[in-house]
Image: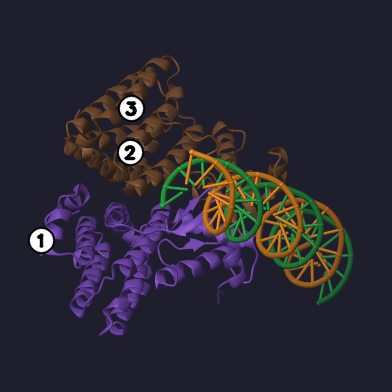
Chain colours: A purple, B brown, C orange, D green
Amino acid sequence: MTFQAIDSQSTAENLADQIRDAILVGKLHPGDRLIELELSKSFNTSRGPIREAIRILATEGLVEHRKNRGAIVSAPSFDDVLEVYAMRMALGAIAVSHAAQLSSKHEPDLHPLLEKLETIQNFCVGTPNQMIPHDLEFQSMLIALGELPRIKEIFDHTAVDIGVFVRFLGIKYDDSDHISLVKRHKDLLAAISDSNSDLAVEIWNRHIQISVREFMKPFSDLEIKKLFERPLLKNLFEMEIVQ
Amino acid sequence: MTFQAIDSQSTAENLADQIRDAILVGKLHPGDRLIELELSKSFNTSRGPIREAIRILATEGLVEHRKNRGAIVSAPSFDDVLEVYAMRMALGAIAVSHAAQLSSKHEPDLHPLLEKLETIQNFCVGTPNQMIPHDLEFQSMLIALGELPRIKEIFDHTAVDIGVFVRFLGIKYDDSDHISLVKRHKDLLAAISDSNSDLAVEIWNRHIQISVREFMKPFSDLEIKKLFERPLLKNLFEMEIVQ
DNA sequence: CAATTGTAGATTGTTGACAATTTTAGGAGA
DNA sequence: TCTCCTAAAATTGTCAACAATCTACAATTG
């Protein structure tokens, strides 16, 4: 029997988690200042650990820190969305392909992923927006299969960004999104365990494209047309989506 | 004329720079412990800023930090080299392509890059290993043209890794490497200012492949054959190199 | 003698006080 | 009224003392 070491995180990391959640949940808004003394009081700790937590969030890009001026919650733009998704597409493709070529090694590791998918499938009917954190966690587990720790870490950072974007831009999913998402993920896992890395990458890229489209929902047709003039967006959709 | 604000860095960042240099220069070896009190004495400061500096280095992957146990200089493996280069290829391709599609905007920005190339060309004759930091800085400036700040930041982190690899694996360049490198970089800049993003990406990828080959020099033919069984390496060289 | 438990020293984690810097607000002069 | 200056308030940066934890090694047990 193995036990999970309690307290494996440092206090600063715990604090960072809580502040991050506050941002993700909307208790803290872009532009808000993070004042060390204030935070240290509300978390009942001293300024030291709070400082560290803020640095962590700063490296994640969640807050902006300027010397002697403190940190403010940063406001992501649509360009940030595009950059983050471009990174996720590129890095995810490497990881997914690597996972496929490694697959013989870890058939068993696929089980928790399938379980996660079940959760998404069953738990989120009717409330498809609740699937976002689950989906992000699924993707994180997926990338972990690639056994590339640096890529995994950066990938997880971008997941936080996406959480912010979803809240900030007010994205709404519906149940059809939800069903197709589960299907795509199942296909992807199948491709990986078949060691079919090309197929895996293809599905992955398509998945990113579809995700980006979600973020374009709030815009009008005219605006979308304008968005497609941006090189990054063009590149993201360069490869044809074969349905 | 714009001036660089003196003191624009925080003390922690300055300390991080100095410790990083100590690692890059070989004063600190992989496995060495970074003891806060010791460092605070030798840098004549208190432990607070030193702690922050260590965290910075930890996010860069230069040191490994374990709770309550302090930080040790990490020892990169060849797998790390491959992962880092895979990231640099993928992220660099995005940035370079983006730069090309933006190029009309910043013709003038190319000047400092060309100057840097001159430096490499003239200054490094006979001592090609001195070109490494210049080359890494050139590449950093190149990626900056892409105007994708997150990618730029990650890219710069990987540059530090490469510095460590070079020292740790004892890579040696010769003058022919040096000449061909300058040529490739010039071609790349030309492609960017021609807005030829496909060509730019192609040259970029080839450049990464050649760089990876440098890291394989110390190995025997048999070892190299074995290395090529690794999926990451195979993928890096998947695209044909057309000379 | 091997395995476990206890203990001292070293090191990291936390805290509150003080210093340095930035921001704010108010007032003097044009 | 507007701009510029100054002083106070707010806030971040730094420090040294203290607390908690880990490491290494000695003591104890079976």
Q: Amino acid at mark 2?
A: Ile
Q: Amino acid at mark 3?
A: Leu
Residue B113 - label: 3
Above or below, A156 against B175 in this view is: below
Dot 3 falls on which chain? B
Give percent across and percent down for residue B1: 39, 28
Q: Which residue is mark 2?
A: B143
**Marks 2 and 1 on same chain:** no
Residue A42 visible? yes
Give percent across and percent down for residue B120: 38, 21
* C-alpha gap between disc 3 and disc 2: 11 Å
The residue sitting at 32% across, 19% down in the picture is B179
Q: Is residue A224 left or right of residue A94?
A: left
Dot 2 falls on which chain? B
Residues at circles 3 and 2 in contact by the CB criterion of under 8 Å: no
Give percent across and percent down for residue A162: 33, 63
Please state which of the two labelled residues, at mark 3 or mark 1, is closer to the viewer: 3
Residues at circles 3 and 1 in contact by the CB criterion of under 8 Å: no
Dot 1 falls on which chain? A
Residue A182 lies in quadrant: bottom left
